[in-house]
Image (cartoon, rainbow, N blue to C red):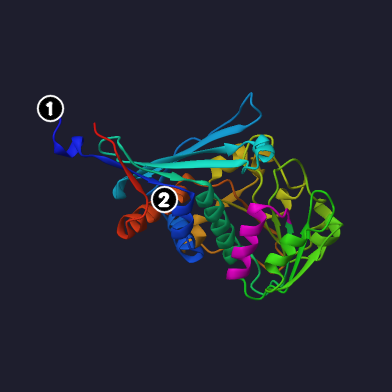
């Protein structure tokens, strides 16, 4: 027999505008750091990833997980639909749902686009903080889209010694809008030659659709750190053959990286999960001339910890739309 608890149940909806007014760079950084630590301490579980191509030309995926001790359970349904550009829309689409693990009932549904963007930027920032040389002054980024911009935002936020940014575009032409975003923070230079830009940089960030190697392995000089963002599906890659074997490789999740990240091309290469560094369980032990790589595939726990933060903030501030959801 239904009671008032079930009959009066509600579901919180947080749309794009709600999410964007609640997210801040530092709060997302803290939530993602927490996700890495939960994962490294085996307090948070990451379930197998779904990532499938569609007949429509899109790619659909589901990342899910839980933190049992905190009653945190949920998933993100997301993917990439390039045809959205012709409609004037964003090709990346994502929706996050948090679920009550005791009843299976949804707690909230959240527009996941900004969550995905910010949490990936924060993860990249933590990778730089842990692995890039402290005296790094120059950075090369491949791409000028949404993810390239947020990666650079977090890099400049966390590495205050950066002085020169070189950027490489897919079409080989400068991007004035991209330059304008960061010109007040450092020197921003368009780089027509990828190998030359990589050879001149202490840090390299690859934030492209992952269509193939972006530069030659010989261009990477000793001491370089590389954040790899674009390889998140079987068949994608951004790094050249032969580079993984020369580097100390770090991943967000070893199994995921070997299935859909850069490590899918060399799953035998040893790797360390970065949560152990973030949580202080191990030290990177990087020598000045070591090449380091952070193979980022994106953890469901990152989406969930950011979503929980948003739910708490929205509830306190009375933000969002509550709809009747009786059961």
Q: Nearer the viewer, residue 100 or 295?
A: 100
| Label 2–label 1 contact, CB within 8 A | no
Residue at the spot 74% in from the left edge and 47% down from the top edge? 239
Task: Confirm whether the magenta stretch covers residue 29.
Answer: no
Identify the mark nearer the N-term, 2 or 1: 1
* 192 lies above or below 183: above
Task: Confirm whether the magenta stretch covers residue 156.
Answer: yes
Q: Tell me the CA gap for discs 2 and 1.
A: 32 Å
Residue at the spot 55% in from the left edge and 44% down from the top edge? 254
* Residue 221 at x, y percent in the picture: 79, 62
* Residue 235 at x, y percent in the picture: 69, 35
> Where's the C terminus, which quadrant?
top left
Q: Nearer the viewer, residue 30 or 149?
A: 149
Q: Which secondary structure lies at badge 2?
A: helix
> Where's the N terminus, which quadrant?
top left
Decide: few, some or many residues near mark 2? Use Cα within 10 Å; few <14, some 14-19, many ≥20. many
Please identify, in this view, whether the residue under mark 2 or under mark 1 is nearer the observer.
1
Q: Quadrant of residue 318?
A: bottom left
The residue singled out by tag 2 in the image is: 307
Residue at the spot 43% in from the left edge and 58% down from the top edge? 34
Q: Nearer the viewer, residue 324 or 214?
A: 324
Q: Please give left or right for residue 82 compared with residue 222 in the image.
A: left
The numbered disc on residue 267 is none
Residue at the spot 47% in from the left edge and 51% down from the top edge? 302
* Residue 94 at x, y percent in the picture: 52, 41
The numbered disc on residue 1 is 1
Q: Which secondary structure lies at badge 1?
A: loop
Instruction: Report if residue 43 is visible in the image.
Output: yes
Instruction: Report if residue 33 is visible in the image.
Output: no
* 177 lies above or below 4: below
Q: Which residues are magenta?
A: 142-158
Q: Residue furthest top?
A: 55
């Amino acid at each position: 027999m239904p009671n008032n608890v079930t009959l009066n149940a509600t579901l919180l909806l947080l749309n794009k505008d709600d999410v964007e007014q609640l997210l801040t760079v530092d709060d997302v950084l803290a939530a993602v750091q927490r996700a890495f630590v939960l994962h490294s301490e085996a307090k948070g579980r990451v379930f197998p990833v779904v990532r499938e191509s569609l007949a429509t030309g899109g790619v659909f995926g589901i990342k899910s997980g839980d933190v049992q001790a905190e009653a945190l359970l949920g998933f993100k349904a997301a993917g990439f639909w390039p045809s959205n550009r012709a409609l004037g829309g964003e090709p990346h689409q994502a929706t996050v749902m948090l679920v009550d693990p005791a009843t299976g009932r949804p707690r909230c549904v959240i527009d996941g686009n900004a969550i995905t963007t910010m949490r990936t930027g924060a993860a990249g920032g933590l990778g730089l903080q842990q692995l890039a040389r402290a005296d790094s002054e120059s950075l090369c980024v491949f791409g000028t889209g949404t993810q390239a911009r947020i990666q650079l935002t977090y890099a400049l936020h966390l590495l205050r010694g950066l002085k020169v940014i070189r950027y490489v575009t897919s079409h080989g032409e400068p991007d004035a809008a991209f330059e304008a975003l960061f010109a007040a923070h450092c020197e921003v230079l368009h780089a027509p030659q990828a190998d030359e830009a990589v050879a001149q940089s202490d840090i390299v960030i690859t934030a492209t659709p992952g269509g193939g190697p972006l530069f030659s392995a010989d261009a990477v000089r000793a001491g370089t750190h590389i954040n790899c963002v674009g390889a998140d599906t079987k068949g994608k890659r951004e790094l050249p053959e032969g580079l993984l074997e020369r580097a100390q490789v770090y991943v967000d999740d070893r199994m995921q990286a070997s299935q859909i990240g850069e490590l899918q091309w060399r799953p035998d290469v040893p790797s360390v999960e970065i949560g152990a560094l973030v949580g202080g369980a191990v030290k990177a032990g990087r020598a000045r001339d070591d090449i380091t790589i952070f193979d980022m595939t994106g953890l469901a726990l990152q989406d969930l910890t950011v979503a929980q933060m948003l739910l708490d903030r929205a509830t306190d501030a009375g933000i969002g739309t509550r709809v009747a959801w009786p059961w």
